[in-house]
Image (spheres, rainbow, N blue to C red):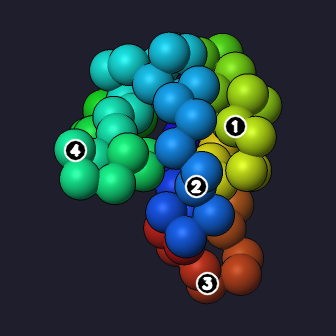
Amino acid sequence: MQVSVDRDRCCGAGQCVMAAPDVFDQGEDDGLVLLRPGAAGQAAHADLELAAGLCPAGAITVCEAPRTGPGDTDGAAGT
């Protein structure tokens, strides 16, 4: 699972922190979203989807990590 945040879009509402506090935080200086390093891989998919859905600015993107292996034909392993 891959999670990304767009701090330029963030409005600091904090809904993401309420939905998934182990994954998201807010900056002390500006109140904008911060992604806790490595935490997204440990979080429940439902919590991440909820956080993205609750974000009023649409600043959170959640997507499945691409699969790599013998069936890969596009040569884009890991991207």
The N terminus sits in image quarter: top right
Q: Which label sits in the foreground, 3 or 2? A: 2
5 relative to 72, above or below:
above
Q: Are marks 4 and 3 in contact (CB under 8 Å)?
A: no
CA separation, marks 4 and 3?
41 Å
Q: Which label sits in the foreground, 4 or 3? A: 4
Reading the image, the residue beneath label 2 is: 10
Q: Which mark is residue 75?
A: 3
Q: Amino acid at mark 3?
A: Gly
Q: Which label sits in the foreground, 1 or 3? A: 1
The C terminus sits in image quarter: bottom right
Reading the image, the residue beneath label 4 is: 28
Please tell me which residue lies in front, 48 or 42. 48
The crowding category of the residue bearing disc 2, from other C-alpha atoms within 10 Å (few below 14, some 14 to 19, many at least 20), is some
- Identify which residue is drawn at 76% across, 40% down: 56
- Identify which residue is drawn at 50% across, 15% down: 18
Q: Amino acid at mark 1?
A: Cys
Disc nearer the start of the sequence (4/1) = 4
Residue 63 is situated, as x and y percent measured from the top left of the image, at: 67, 47
CA separation, marks 4 and 1?
19 Å
Answer yes or no: is residue 6 visible. yes
Q: Amino acid at mark 4?
A: Glu
Q: Are marks 2 and 1 in contact (CB under 8 Å)?
A: yes
Answer yes or no: is residue 41 visible. no
- Identify which residue is drawn at 28% across, 47% down: 27
Q: Amino acid at mark 2?
A: Cys
Disc nearer the start of the sequence (2/1) = 2
- Identify which residue is drawn at 22% across, 44% down: 28
Q: Which mark is residue 55?
A: 1
Disc nearer the start of the sequence (4/2) = 2
Disc nearer the start of the sequence (3/2) = 2
CA separation, marks 3 and 2?
34 Å
